[in-house]
Amino acid sequence: MASAVFDTAVIGGGILGLAAARSIGRRNGARVVVLEAESKLAEHQTGHNSGVIHSGLYYKPGSLKAQTCGGGREAMYAFCEKHGIRHERCGKLVVATSTAERPRLDELERRGRANGLTGLTRLDADGIREHEPHVAGVAGLHVPDTGIVDYSQVCEAIADEIREQDGEIRTGARFLGLQRNNGALVLETAAGDVEARRLINCAGLRCDDVARLCGVTPTVRIIPFRGEYYKLRPERESLVRHLIYPVPDPGFPFLGVHFTRMVGGGVEAGPNAVLAFRREGYTRTSFSAGDMTSTLTWPGFWKMAGRHWRTGCGEMWRSWSKAAFVQALRKLMPELKEDDVTPHGAGVRAQAVGRDGALLDDFCIERAENQLHVLNAPSPGATASLAIGDALAGMAAGSA
Ligand SMILES: Cc1cc2nc3c(=O)[nH]c(=O)nc-3n(C[C@H](O)[C@H](O)[C@H](O)COP(=O)(O)OP(=O)(O)OC[C@H]3O[C@@H](n4cnc5c(N)ncnc54)[C@H](O)[C@@H]3O)c2cc1C
């Protein structure tokens, strides 16, 4: 028996599910319920990310990422101001470490300008050192609008707004299956049934499983990629002033290991990108037979592996060898030593991979009757969350 009738049930209490619920409640006062499997909000990607408010530099103009990152970034800064959440618009430096990387840096600058970024500054080797005295590069791009925040704190404030709008947040309420009752949806959860007119799936690492439970056959599968971090020892934190990134490999949706000053103090280095043997697998030995079967039975996984095995092996090696990880960081900061860093946890990315082996770069949302399924929401998903939430609310209203 369902306990209440809601306008919308949102599956997943990460930043996207919460942002969508907030936007729907704000839009027309509709009653919303957020169903979160864990006992706390933001336990997975949102609570294990780099905490960067991205500027919008990298994304192909016209893509969903480009459309939502700039607006989402400014909305995020305004939201933090309104709720007194600690944040800093500290700027970042993208560094080309060889002349071969210059054309890719040019392309980033072009994309940034096309995406409406202002204040971008090109730097030579001396200019780089003025911003970051310990970084060596042949050319740099300074991006003033990048910032830092703790997204778990943002989630707490969004959850407060949802409750103020008379919405409900239920933790320990893993979504298990869907029935229909006179046109309404009945969502079976670990904490009882919930009836709603429509649902939005924001289940992150489990979004494809959830879509299948809703009767939708997704065109992609989630392949989990763990991103491991190191932390600079406190006495070496002075090596980094703000955020320092390499020029990313355009063949991959990941940004390459970088240095990030955290808003709560300390400096992180990472993340790498290694295949995870469990979707919520935060250590090298985490393993789930079910998750591995899901990965290995997807034809796209083998096509992706065939194409990128060399890079994949390098990432695996950097995962096991601290020396190799530090070597990658030393490209940006030659004086960094192995002793300067200590292991500092990991996050797992929900990366959608197509049947053809393509790593989906853009955000991906699929529609079904009275349902929306967010099937790819990698970085800058947290930055763009408030804009994506508005977009989902608009789409949900349109499909009512
Ligand atoms: C290592 C790493 C670094 C990143 N760095 C950045 C960054 O610096 N800046 C940035 O903008 N973005 C960054 N990102 C991306 C960003 O974190 C994600 O885009 C964003 O967190 C996605 O939010 P989400 O709500 O979709 O997913 P999640 O935060 O994973 O939330 C999904 C939720 O769904 C719940 N769930 C799953 N199955 C069920 C079920 N059956 N029933 C109910 N609930 C369920 C999960 O428990 C989880 O809480 C990073 C990501 C990673 C992994």
Image: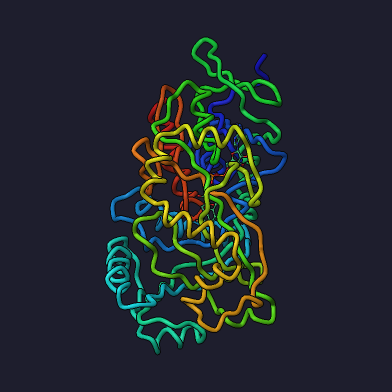
Which corner quadrant holds the C terminus?
top left
Q: Is residue 127 visible?
A: yes
On screen, 107 above or below 40?
Answer: below
Query: Residue 364 at what x, y percent from top left?
Result: 40, 40
Query: Residue 96 at what x, y percent from top left?
Result: 37, 75
Query: Residue 156 at what x, y percent from top left?
Result: 65, 50
353 left or right, relative to 177? left
**Rendered image quadrant of residue 189:** top right
16 left or right, relative to 120? right
In depth, the one of 27 and 277 nearer the eye is: 277
Which corner quadrant holds the N terminus?
top right
The residue under the point 55% across, 42% down is: 22
The residue under the point 30% across, 63% down is: 111
The residue under the point 34% across, 38% down is: 356
Residue closest to the far top: 182
316 left or right, relative to 282? left
Query: Residue 268 at what x, y percent from top left?
Result: 60, 68
On screen, 113 above or below 65?
Answer: below
**Rendered image quadrant of residue 194:** top right
Q: Is residue 160 visible?
A: no
In depth, the one of 44 and 26 nearer the eye is: 44
In depth, the one of 198 and 321 nearer the eye is: 321
